Amino acid sequence: MDDIFVGSLMTSPVTTVRAETPAKEAAAQMIDEGISSVVVVDDDDQLVGILTSTDFVAIAAAPKSAASFSVADHMTSDVVTTTAGASIEDVADLLIGHSIHHVPVVDDAEGVVGMVTTTDLTAYLAGAVDAEAARAWT
């Protein structure tokens, strides 16, 4: 499994929002695109956080109206990241070790270049991703 790299399984490009985006707007975007997370970026498109469907549980449970929240109110700002050249074994260890389901893929020059999720890894392990094509990524 360690000869398959994150770049071959990641989703790219990723959906991004700004921290000041209303949470309701981010939720609608996630539903429209059929995704379970958005990457939060600053004005220079640099990663500042992540907002996942799990975060919306906290929003729904909050005593005030969800319409009043921005993405910044519930995003995770201490984001665990990986690189496209990391092995999927390493990213699986990250996912398990941090009890998370989404890891943004970053590049020093380009910023956020993709997203790898537990669903991506499951699809690969289930044979839904062509192993030879995945190995060809470099």
Image: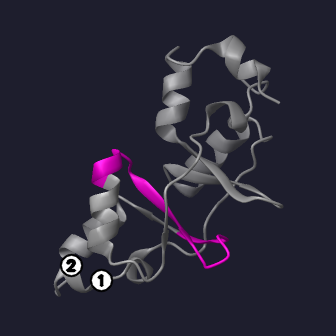
Locate residue 45, reporting x and y percent: 64, 70
Mark 1–mark 2 CB contact (< 8 Å): yes
Element carrying mark 2:
helix
Q: On the rendered structure, is 79 left or right of 68?
A: right
Q: Which mark is residue 66?
A: 2
Q: Residue drawn at (79%, 24%), measured in percent from left and top? A: 3
Which of the 4 image quadrants contains residue 65? bottom left
**Location of the N terminus (image quadrant):** top right
Q: Is residue 23 magenta?
A: no
Q: Amino acid at mark 1?
A: Phe
Element carrying mark 1:
loop
Q: Residue drawn at (72%, 41%), measured in percent from left and top? A: 90
Q: On the rendered structure, is 62 left or right of 131?
A: left
Q: Amino acid at mark 2?
A: Ala
Which of the 4 image quadrants contains residue 11? top right
Rendering colour mode: one colour
Q: Residues within 10 Å of mark 1 (few under 14, many from 20)?
A: some
Locate residue 103, reporting x and y percent: 59, 52
Residue extent of the magenta highlight: 31-49
Residue with the mark numbered 1:
69
Above-or-below relation of 137 to 86: above
Locate residue 24, reporting x and y percent: 26, 71
Above-or-below relation of 30 to 56: above
Q: Residue drawn at (54%, 52%), measured in percent from left and top? A: 14
Q: Nearer the viewer, residue 84 or 94?
A: 84
